[in-house]
Amino acid sequence: MDRAENEQNGPLKLLLVANYLPDRWDSMNRFADMLARGMSTRGLSVRTVRPEPIVNPSGKSAKGLGKWLGYIDKFVLFPPALAAAAGWADVVHICDSYNSGYVGLLKDKPVVVTCHDLLAVKEVLGESTDCQSSPLGHVLRRWQLKQLQRADAVACDSVYTRADVERLSASPRRFSLHHIQLPIDERFGLLSRGETMQILQGVPQLDRAKPFVLHVGTSHPRKNRAGVLRTFALASRDWDAQLVLAGEPLSAEHVRLAESLGITHKMLVLVKPSDLVLKALYNAAFVFLFPSTFEGYGWPLLEAQACGCPVVCSTCGPFPEVVGDSAQLRAVDDEEGMAEDILKLKDDASRREWILRGSQNIKRFSIDRMINEYISLYRALCGEENRKAND
């Protein structure tokens, strides 16, 4: 009887390896926290470890000097701490494949790695994904891909990413490969109109009497903020609306583009809004516009739908599998088409139909399902390790 199945031996002990906080990968940290809460609720004994900002105590952004200090924290100081922590665990789960370099430290433990995307790796290998890397970044990405293939199991959020892992892995493949969907973040959901307006009173720049188009993201090229600006400019030529950009500040290039399009006075940039404000924005938005060029999954699409907001997005990578027929999809360069789709939502019946489709779609993305699938994977790996030890 394996240790996962023998309840008398106590709960399965799970070590989660999370991201270095100064890197500011908020979605990856949310995923690790979601796993920790879900597994603890299901009776597993869970510990989370991550590289600590020791050499970089101020938590500077991972750029310039902060980047190099971060390398010391992540690749010099953290490995011994991880190896020591792993001695306690039955199974180790590296929550982001860009940390797969740690797999080699865990030779005596079954290791699961979640791969959210391989976009930066694909760019290094010559495929255009709008993810530029430095010369050192090229070395790191190739090393991470090599180490990823040493894991016992790799779980991918999307079929799209799973296909990338399968295609780019050396043959024969030693790890098992799985598709385990991300669930909807429980922080997002429907609010009453009164609750929404009360929260948005804290955003005085927003004209709550006007409809607004919402985009959530950064100025990273693959987020295609330029496409957001151009699409909004087309849609708002004869429509009195606002554009709300939530996330990072606009780049100087995007500021110049907005000025040239004559839409600066219609725009509102909200830098790092709180979860509550973001939830209210999703609930109040006329439409969520997300024309990314490259993604590994598309969590914001589901967040918007969970809050009752219709979605217009590109046909980028995994988006068709995430939203199916519950959103209006266009080729990423069809900005006129996206503007037309936005304006179609001015018809109340059409807008209600797309909201209903979104509410039906999100039922596919259950946190219980994700937790169950990962627990099954952990148990299978622990059982396999015991069988190997007994051979």
Image: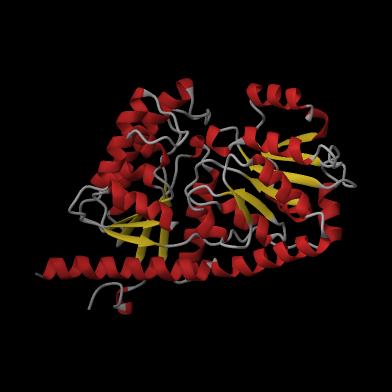
Could you tell whether 144 is left or right of 183 in the image?
Answer: left
Residue under the point 41% across and 28% down: 133
Foreground of the two, 220 or 61 = 220
Q: Position of residue 347 (x, y in %)?
A: 82, 58
Residue under the point 43% across and 71% down: 372
Residue 124 versus residue 196 in the image, above or below: above
Residue under the point 42% across and 41% down: 119
Residue 85 versus residue 266 in the image, above or below: below
Looking at the rendering, in which quadrant would you find the C terminus?
bottom left
Residue 104 versus residue 264 in the image, above or below: below
Q: Which colour scheme appears in the figure?
A: secondary structure
* Residue 261 seen in the current view: yes
Residue under the point 49% across and 30% down: 57
Q: Where is residue 112 in the image (x, y as percent from the top left)?
A: 33, 56
* Residue 94 seen in the current view: no
Could you tell whether 247 is left or right of 147 in the image?
Answer: right
Query: Can you tell which quarter of the image residue 247 is in?
Result: top right
Looking at the rendering, in which quadrant would you find the N terminus?
bottom left
Q: Where is residue 337 in the image (x, y as percent from the top left)?
A: 67, 45
Could you tell whether 262 is left or right of 274 in the image?
Answer: right
Foreground of the two, 39 or 346 = 346
Give the farthest residue toward the left. Answer: 391
Could you tell whether 46 is left or right of 262 in the image?
Answer: left
The number of callouts visible is 0
Q: Position of residue 263 (x, y in %)?
A: 79, 30
